[in-house]
């Protein structure tokens, strides 16, 4: 491998080559994709790479691309192939006149690829974005403190099904995975996949994310990639490292003013015929019990 500390600077990022890894430092300029700014820097061990390519780019550039092994990076696992090319943190775009230098570093990286590069990794090898993480979705605020994920619903966006279920809190050990559907598509969402048997009497998760209390939905300006994807990656990493299973936590305790506001909104849903008398009375009693 090249000398430790060698740096190849490109557009929006610079790669620093060490004896066992590549440190990717992202710029924080106004034109740098917000996802790169949010990530800051990432250290990629050689054992996390499957291949290295160099190809012509757009408008007089070349692209050095380090392809991660499946299962090696929680960010790319959460993205599940949905990232646009310009958001791929493993692509380094360089002016075409630096092609010879880029080819040199590509050859150096290929020479140190692990013998198992063609097979999926059996564990995450790249660090995940650290907790705490939070972002605003269309129907609620999502928070992750490293041990549990919480959803607090917005009365302006949450469905009646989510209001009836109440705010949610899920310990990592109650989860088996995370589904992230990019906010760049019409029906984007982040859904927590619950473990089988994680709660007595737990019903199957609804197919539609807007009806699922274990999911938040995105919308224009809500749940952008640079906020929701690092969140999903941090949760996914924690799920893989989880301890013994615990039951799903009940709805979090709320302030009296919040409870009063939620009862008022339940009354509106009841008046509009979206809640039956029994559902309204049961949910109202549940909220009052939290005072």
Image: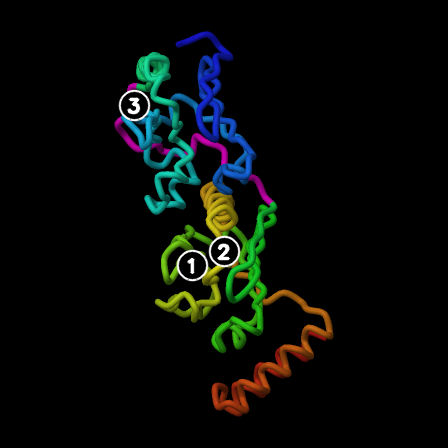
Quadrant housing the N terminus:
top left
- For label 1, the residue is 189
Q: Position of residue 143 (x, y in %)?
A: 58, 54
Q: Nearer the viewer, mark 3 or mark 1?
A: 3
Determine whether, in the image, residue 211 is placed left or right of residue 117: right
Q: Are marks 2 and 3 in contact (CB under 8 Å)?
A: no
Please report the residue visible at 34 percent of the width from the left and 45 percent of the height from the top.
80
Q: Is residue 215 visible?
A: no
Q: Residue furthest top?
A: 3
Q: Is residue 283 above or below residue 245?
A: below
Q: Nearer the viewer, mark 2 or mark 3?
A: 3
User: Which sits earlier in the primary sequence, circle 2 or circle 3?
Assistant: 3
Q: Is residue 128 magenta?
A: yes
Q: Give the secondary structure at mark 2.
A: loop
- For label 2, the residue is 223
Separation (CA) of disc 3 from disc 1? 34 Å
Q: Is residue 275 above or below residue 96?
A: below
Q: Nearer the viewer, mark 1 or mark 2?
A: 2
Please report the residue visible at 53 percent of the width from the left and 77 percent of the height from the top.
164
Residue range highlighted in magenta = 115-131
Quarter of the image holding residue 96?
top left
Which mark is drawn over residue 54? 3
Tell me the chief SS of the magenta region.
loop
């Amino acid at each position: 491998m090249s000398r430790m500390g060698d740096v190849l600077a490109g557009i929006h990022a610079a790669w620093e080559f060490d004896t066992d890894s590549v440190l990717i430092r992202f710029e924080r300029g106004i034109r740098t994709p917000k996802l790169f700014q949010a990530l800051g820097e990432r250290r990629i061990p050689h054992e996390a790479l499957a291949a290295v390519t160099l190809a012509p780019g757009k408008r007089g550039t070349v692209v050095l691309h380090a392809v991660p092994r499946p299962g090696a990076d929680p960010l790319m696992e959460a993205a599940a192939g949905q990232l646009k090319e310009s958001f791929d943190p493993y692509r380094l775009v360089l002016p075409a006149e630096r092609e010879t230098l880029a080819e040199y570093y590509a050859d150096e990286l290929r020479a140190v690829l692990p013998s198992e590069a063609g097979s999926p990794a059996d564990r995450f090898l790249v660090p995940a974005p650290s907790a705490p993480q939070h972002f605003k979705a269309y129907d609620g605020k999502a928070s992750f403190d490293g041990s549990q994920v919480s959803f607090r619903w917005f009365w302006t966006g949450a469905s009646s099904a989510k209001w009836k279920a109440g705010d949610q809190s899920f310990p990592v050990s109650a989860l088996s995975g995370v589904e992230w559907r990019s906010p760049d598509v019409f029906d984007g969402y982040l859904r927590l996949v619950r473990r089988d048997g994680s709660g007595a009497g737990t019903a199957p998760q609804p197919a539609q994310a807007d009806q699922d209390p274990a999911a938040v939905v995105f919308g224009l300006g809500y749940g952008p990639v640079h906020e929701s994807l690092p969140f999903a990656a941090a949760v996914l990493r924690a799920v893989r490292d989880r301890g013994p299973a615990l039951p799903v936590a009940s709805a979090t305790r709320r302030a009296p003013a919040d409870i009063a506001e939620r009862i008022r909104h339940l009354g509106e849903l009841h008046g509009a015929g979206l809640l039956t008398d029994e559902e309204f009375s049961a949910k109202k009693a549940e909220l009052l019990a939290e005072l």
